[in-house]
Image (cartoon, helix red, strand yellow):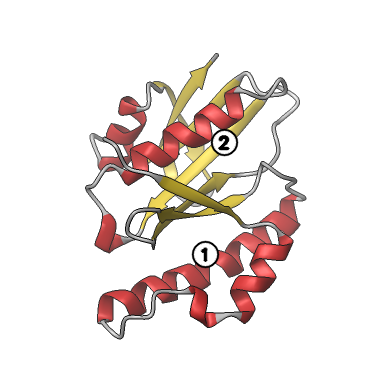
Amino acid sequence: MGMKLSFIPLDEANIVQLQQNAELFPTSESDEAFEVKRLVTAVVNQAHLFQKKVKASSPWIGYLVVDAEENEIIGCCGFKGNPTPESEVEIAYYTFPPYEKRGYATQMTKTLTQLALEREEVKIVLAHTLPGNNASARVLEKARFGRTKTVTDPEDNEVWRWERSR
């Protein structure tokens, strides 16, 4: 797929700018645009709190993702903290509902994975999904992750662990 995505780092400076400038969000008055603006606002606020909590440093932060051709924010992705002493880093991704099933999540996953594996401090990129043949599992398969085991997550209970290494 020949899509061009831009990744806006949710670092401190960009978070402040996004929180103070509503015109950076989609301007349409449609219900869909309103929902995307609501989601972006929530993502920015949650990323800010989470990154402070885990003391994340760049590039191990969250990103808003923009379809550069459409100039629309289509989702978000990021790392769930800095790499561990075991040289692992976890990724997460979310495509906003109006933009699902277009390959965006797969592209976000591939981009985050490449960014992580280019760094010396990372040997394994991991992700978790709910068990089953769901959209997230298919995204990770397309990004060449392998399912390694089932683990218990404090929020989601049983989840599948996926890994991709150098």
Marker disc for residue 80: none
Q: Foreground: 77 or 138?
A: 77
Q: How many marks?
A: 2
Q: Secondary structure at mark 1?
A: helix
Which label's residue is closer to the chain start, 1 or 2?
Answer: 1
Q: Position of residue 106 (x, y in %)?
A: 35, 37
Measured as percent of width and height from the top left, residue 128 is found at: 45, 37
Q: Residue at x 37, y 53 (%)?
A: 67
On-image quarter of the C terminus: top right
At numbered mark 2, what does the secondary structure look like: helix, strand or loop?
strand
In the image, what residue occupies the spot 59% across and 51% down? 62
Disc 2 marks a residue whose amino acid type is Glu
**Quarter location, residue 36:** bottom left
Q: Seen in the image, is 116 located left or right of residue 36?
A: right
Say whether residue 162 is left or right of residue 130. Answer: right
The alpha-carbon separation of the residues under discs 1 and 2 comes to: 18 Å
Q: Residues within 10 Å of mark 2 (few under 14, many from 20)?
A: many
Query: Does residue 131 show up?
Result: no
Res 27 → quadrant:
bottom left
Q: Which residue is disc 1 drawn over?
A: 43
Q: Position of residue 80 (x, y in %)?
A: 60, 44
Q: Residue at x 51, y 30 (%)?
A: 113
Q: Which residue is mark 2?
A: 90
Q: Using the image, determine if residue 111 lies above or below residue 145.
A: below
